[in-house]
Image (cartoon, rainbow, N blue to C red):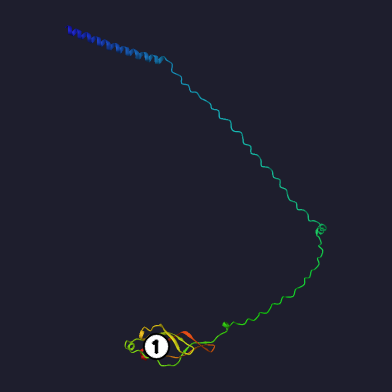
Amino acid sequence: MYVRAAKSGKSSRIAGMVTAVGVTALLGYVVVVSVDKFMPPEEVRTELALITPPPPPPPIEIPEPPKVEVVEEIEAPPAPPELVALDIEVLPELPTIVAAVADPIPIPEPIPVAPSPAAVSQTRSSPKLLASDKPAYPAAARRNGEQGTTQLEVCVGANGRVTSVSVARSSGSPKLDEAAAKWIRGERFQPAKVNGAAQDVCGHSVHYEWSLRDA
């Protein structure tokens, strides 16, 4: 029994405390609501500020352009004939000077110059081979079928005799060239002449053609 009584008292205290707390909260709510109803609302004020614009700038004065006066040029009237005549100066007549004309200088005639001896035209003639027999065709060259033209350079004296012989161009066969040189040494020439006088000449060309048809 004691235990149940103790538990019942404790429960009663807890319930009383909860009830007290609830009552206190309710009273606080009622007080707050009442205060809100009786307090006047706050006034909301809106202030307007008027901004005055700045004054306009003063007008810019543009100076007027300077006035240009146009002056018309007035042509001067022509001078009267009397004044023009006075401005002309009459020059005195100058004496005419007559210069004497000099006689022309005579041009001397050219002096004839005697031609030098070297300038006198000379008549020349080359050596000429006199008629003679043909050289003998070498037998070895004929058997080998050798032929061609031998060119000789000879010196001919004033007496028409050959003083020297050289082969200027070969025929291609030494046997034919040697036979041609031997042949020309024994021949006679009509000597070269200058103004009719016989002269020694070197470098006279003699061509001899070797042909198997004439062998």
Query: Which residue is under mark 1?
Result: 182
Name the quadrant of the C terminus.
bottom left
Residue visible at 32% across and 12% down in the picture: 24
Residue 199 image position (x, y, % from top left): 50, 87
**Which residue sits at x=44%, y=88%?**
162
Residue 54, image quadrant: top right
Which sits in the foreground, 202 or 19? 202
Left or right, 171 with respect to 20, comes to right
Dot 1 lies on which element?
helix
Number of dots carrying numbers: 1
Q: Is residue 188 above or below residue 9?
A: below
Where residue 99 appears, x then y in whole percent? 77, 71
Give how far across and how far down residue 58 sits, in percent. 61, 33
* Amino acid type, residue under disc 1 in the picture: Lys
Q: Taking 89 as reference, is 116 left or right?
A: left
Q: Is residue 76 left or right of residue 32?
A: right
Tell me the crowding category of disc 1: few under 14, some 14 to 19, or many 20 or more residues within 10 angstroms, Cα based: few
Q: Could you say which is closer to the camera, residue 10 or residue 43? A: 10
Viewer-nearest residue: 144 or 80 = 144
Q: Residue at x 40, y 89 (%)?
A: 183
Q: Quadrant of residue 56?
A: top right
Q: Nearer the viewer, residue 24 or 175?
A: 175
Outermost residue toward the top in this view: 2
Quarter of the image with the N terminus in it? top left
Quadrant for residue 176, please give it: bottom left
Q: Position of residue 171 (x, y in %)?
A: 38, 84
